[in-house]
Amino acid sequence: MVSRVIPVEPFDLVIFGGTGDLARRKILPGLFRRFCAGQMPPEARVIGAARAEMDTSAYRTFVSEAIQEFAGVLTCEDGTLDGFLERMHYVPIDARGENGWSELADLMRDDVVRAYYFSVAPGLFGDLAERLNLHGLTDEATRIVVEKPFGRDLETARALNRDLAAYFDESQIYRIDHYLGKETVQNLMAVRFGNMLFEPLWNSQYVDHIQITVAETVGVGGRGEYYDKSGAMRDMVQNHLMQLLCLIAMEPPSKFDPDAVRDEKLKVIRALDPVEPHHIVRGQYEAEEGAPGYREEVNDPRSRTESYIAMKVGVSNWRWAGTPFYLRTGKRLKARCSEITVVFKALNHSIFGEQEDHRNVLSIRLQPNEGITLGVTIKEPGPGGMRLVDVPLDMSFADALGDHASDPPDAYERLIMDVIRGNQTLFMRGDEVEAAWAWTDPIIDGWETRGDVPKTYDSGSEGPVDAVQMLARDTRVWRKVAS
Ligand code: NAD
């Protein structure tokens, strides 16, 4: 299969925070990969803007090192990196002061798409928006990209939305949730809405329950100070897991258009039930040989922040009432895996007599080994009567689509190109983010009021035993955490 790459329009992309960790590990390598794929037109430029005093030549060295460390294996011709570096420019700038703004204004061109990536702490979003406006650096076609965390509760998210809305229309604001840029997440929509097969069964009449798992093997590491003020609920559930839940649960939008999709996602968030305390298990990992426990890592022996959370969530609408969604995410677990599993109901009558419990299970794997597997029940081969067995019908993209699928673009690559194209489908709208916080806030407030203390769990395990018991009470089991 031949890969079709359509170059985007010429652009000036300014990366505020262009010397930061995110720029180094994700944004710059992502842009380079798109450059190698032929998607960046000759007139496209990238301008790093950050506090560090350096010139364009030093920035090109910085970018070159970032590419070599993080861009991965590429089949780029010799000289390609030099060609990419020629597009790089740098301006030292202060988001809170006057330094650098007139130099940036001199660099920007009028006849290309202007995009500003706010890869800085959220506390600077308002300052950047204000100064861009003050220095005449925006027009109606300008786009801004903002990073997570988008607030730490409803009040702060509203304040951020207000700060941006003072200078930009909602159609100009691209709130990144990089989970939405993952190939398989988009495939989830293709599978649901591009096939006759699944949609008629996609409801509480046929679906027993749904599990969404995002498991990491790493601990909080160097992010301890930030993480301890946040926890798994704010860091993962309110954004990434919630977005996955929306895509699974939403009604079919009338067309694949940004607002049609986001309207449907918003309806799901608004239909989420409040979560009862006994439907939540919070955990903290314990020390293992050679690795400190959570409390040691964040340097607070009394920390009550969760590094793990499992919860049972209900969606009160016609389609889903009665089908629970079980979400879980945590650090220092047994394996790194992100997976959505749709477990269908058992047959209401088996013509084959007494058999074990057989179910169709659709697994959508985000990482590692992106792909979709459908478990179907067939006859066990050989003589000896009609014994049934479950086997996977494997939709491995690499096998079916060859090279085209073996190296899919990283989420950031895709999302940045979508910004240049002006396509907001895979970005969160302001009202979605606020609705997600409105659901999350009372849950967190409840823990704080009750003085809830997370359970402990062994590093390298599948999480606290209480999470297993929570499902056992519903006569269900978690899928194994396996890579
Ligand atoms: P970082 O601390 O590594 O870099 C911050 C950047 O902001 C630097 O380039 C710095 O020069 C610049 N900066 C700081 N103050 C400034 C000022 N007053 N004026 C101009 N520039 C200023 O941070 P990071 O890890 O790159 O994260 C950037 C943003 O992305 C944050 O909002 C973070 O939450 C978010 N984010 C990061 C990651 C990640 O993997 N690093 C993942 C998701 C979201």
Image (cartoon, rainbow, N blue to C red):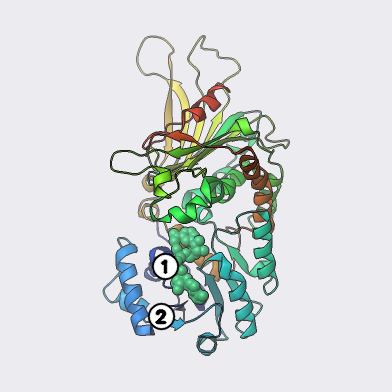
Picture residue at 55% right of the left edge, 58% below the top: 149
Residue at the extreme left of the image, as rendered = 78
Q: Earlier in the sequence, mark 1 or mark 2?
A: 1
**Category of crowding for the residue at label 2, using alpha-carbon neighbours closer than 10 angstroms: few (below 14), some (14–19), many (at least 20):** some
Give x and y (percent) for residue 195. 57, 42
* Mark 1 residue CB less than 8 A from any atom of ligand 1: no
Q: Say which of 35 and 458 sits in front.
A: 458
- Circle 1 is placed at which residue position? 34
In the figure, residue 259 lies in which quadrant? bottom right
Give x and y (percent) for residue 249. 63, 41
- Circle 2 is placed at which residue position? 87
Instruction: State whether residue 106 is above or below residue 311.
Output: below
Which amino acid lies under the numbered mark 1 shown in the image of this protein? Arg
Give x and y (percent) for residue 257. 65, 58
Mark 1: secondary structure: helix
Instruction: State whether residue 194 is above or below residue 463.
Output: below
